[in-house]
Amino acid sequence: MQSLEAVLNHPAIWRGNGCARVAIPSVSTGFPELDAALPGGGWPAAVLTEIYAAHRGIGEMQIFMPAAARLTRAGRRVMLIAPPYIPYAPALAAHGLKLPHLMLVRAERIEERFWACEQALRHQDCGAVLAWIDHAPERALKRLQLAAETGNAIALLFRSARVIPASPAALRLQIERSQDRTLVRVLKRRGSGLPAPIALDLQNSPSVPAGQPRQLEMMS
Amino acid sequence: MLWLALRFPLLPLEIFTRGAAMPDPLAVVSSSSANAEIVACNQQARRHGIDAGMPVTAAWALASGLRVFTHDVPAERAALERAAAWALQFTPTVSIATPIEILLEVEGSLRFFGGLNRLWADIKRKTGVTGYTVHMAGAPTPLAAQLFARAGLPTRIRHGDALRLSLGQLPTSVLELPAALGGLLQDIGIRTLGECLELPRDGLARRAGKELLAQLDRALGNVPDPRPAFMPPQTFKATLPLPAPVENAEMLLFAARRLIAELCGLLAATGKGAQQLKFLLSHEDGRETHLPLNLVTASRDPAHLTSVLRERLERTRLPSPAIAMTLESGMLLPLPSGNLTFLPDEREQTEALSRLIERLRARLGENAVQGLDVIADHRPERAWRACEPGNGEGTWITWRSATRPLWLLNTPRPLAQIHEIPQYEGPLTRLTAAERIESGWWDGDDVKREYFVARNPAQSLLWIYRESGGWYLHGFFS
């Protein structure tokens, strides 16, 4: 027989008593202060996470780079679906990502992007699926959430809406920038209460010397 | 020895009609002339009283809605050869018995397939997928198996003693004797093979010729009956006519499944996989649609091939309805059998990944799925390239200590200037000293730029450069 604890630890079970006790398979973000605010202590796998950033260039991608580096180094795929610009290989490599484990998928139409996400999420050796879809109907998001639950990948949806719509995503973050720091605001998470915005100092990240990314020591 | 005879009684008709489900009465006629005879017809036509051997004019009188196809012997022969190649997945010993039968020697395969009952059911199910009607029978001699199949009896006899008894009950018509000889037997009151066997041998030989006795001896196994072994072809090509013009992807897939099943049977038989496939759709107006499928790794999984084709079809707009479909394989590649391991291993993972890539490519286009690589070039737009997923990281450059953004713009965007200060949603503040990049004079694509990291009032970090007096945005530190 399964113990009650094991049953309650199932990621599909939501408990309203605080976030620290939820055991969700996750990958550390590489930022201890951010890990502390996320249920499961990192980027949660098998649920849909939304990241809202009103502007480009405020660190909205960098907050995922340590986890992406860790995943690709562990031999898992990171898929980039319909990125808005060219994901710049030298910078990705400088952040410690193993390029052979990156995969870029271009899709023009919204429904093709969602379809590609679903295909990737249902695939067992995808570690993370990052997608850029701005105008997402709620039904499509629900489907994506279901697809995320069937696999064990981190599912990140990057959106740039200034007014934040309703969404079935389990984790929703808003990225802002103030005083040269990247602020991560948790809009929704499983668990009670919402933490104060987390300020991350990414200032060094762009000028990481090549070949020795800052996050690598932390990870190994 | 255990021989299975597979007889395809409707083969002349089904080579035309198996591409779609057809409710009409259908028949194949011996020629296009008016005094042609019916060669084969389907159940619906039979219900109207039509049968093989009947003049086509009489058949028209019985069923005015009868659709006829002209007998195509070469196509029939090709179809039978494909069936033989497909059957090699069950046993290495397959033989063609024209015009509409193939023989499988399966004694050695029984253990592998889990006994005769399972093998029988497996063959039945798989012929269903190829779209052919089959009559099967099993016997210790090839001819006896054929005779039972011709009688339409699903007989399975493993031993010689039972063979003589069962054979004796078959009508003499299964021997497919020349008309004169058949008439002779009828005249002397011989109806079954059993009655034939009871006649004195020398008398029968004198009156009916040696051929009849020889056939009976071969069927009983009294004389050897060697059969030529079928050799599988090196590539696969098959055309499937569509009885009614088809535009709908689902109906095209129905037809394609038939061809894919035949191909995969051959692949399983030869231990090979296909990597390049060509589907060709012929249209009413003479045009053709080519649908090449290039797989990342060779495969012989019908479900996978079908799903790749499905995505491809959904992306394709047909100019007009299709009337025929051709499947052609490129070189068949050796594909090791995958069921020898208990644990999911490396190979299985890469195989699963290549399937994902194929599915994505089939729907989104060949260039839609890529990997990324770095290149040793000072020019930022040339320091990366797209490559096959899984490749990449060929040359990593260690001299680079400069800052690089995660997003690079496809083409640098010119920035407006106010009092010589570049603007992007407000004035930009430069945060770093200039990084000079001067390169490319040797290939005519030379750049002379000064790069800076800059910040705008919304605190976005941008990668900008100055070149001959103008300012450009080249990336975001996202």
Image (cartoon, coloured by chain):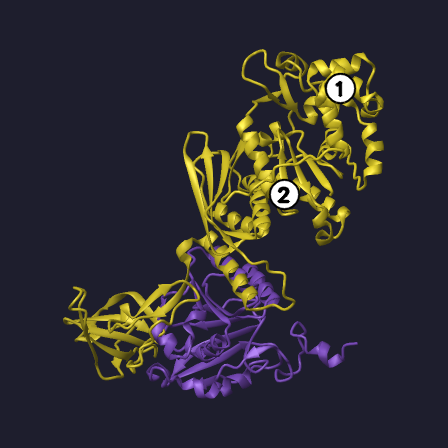
Identify which residue, B354 or B204, lies in the foreground: B204
Identify which residue, B15 or B203, lies in the foreground: B203
Can you see residue B65? no
Residue occupied by mark 2: B87
Q: Amino acid at mark 2?
A: Ala
Q: Residues within 10 Å of mark 1 (few under 14, many from 20)?
A: some
Q: Is residue B50 left or right of residue A146?
A: right
Q: Is residue B261 left or right of residue B114?
A: left
Q: Which secondary structure lies at badge 2?
A: helix
Q: Colour of chain A?
A: purple
Q: Are marks 2 and 1 in contact (CB under 8 Å)?
A: no
Tell me which corner region of the image, top left, top right, bottom left or bottom right, holds residue A101. bottom left
Residue occupied by mark 1: B205
Q: Which chain is yellow?
A: B
Which quarter of the rendered picture does the C terminus of chain B lie within? bottom left
Can you see residue B136? yes
Compared to B457, does B179 lie above or below? above
Tell me which corner region of the image, top left, top right, bottom left or bottom right, holds residue B416. bottom left
Judged by depth in the image, the label closer to the viewer, 2 or 1, is 1
Residue B33 picture location, percent across and down: 54, 13
Chain letter of disc 1 in the image: B
Do the residues at pointers 2 and 1 share their chain? yes
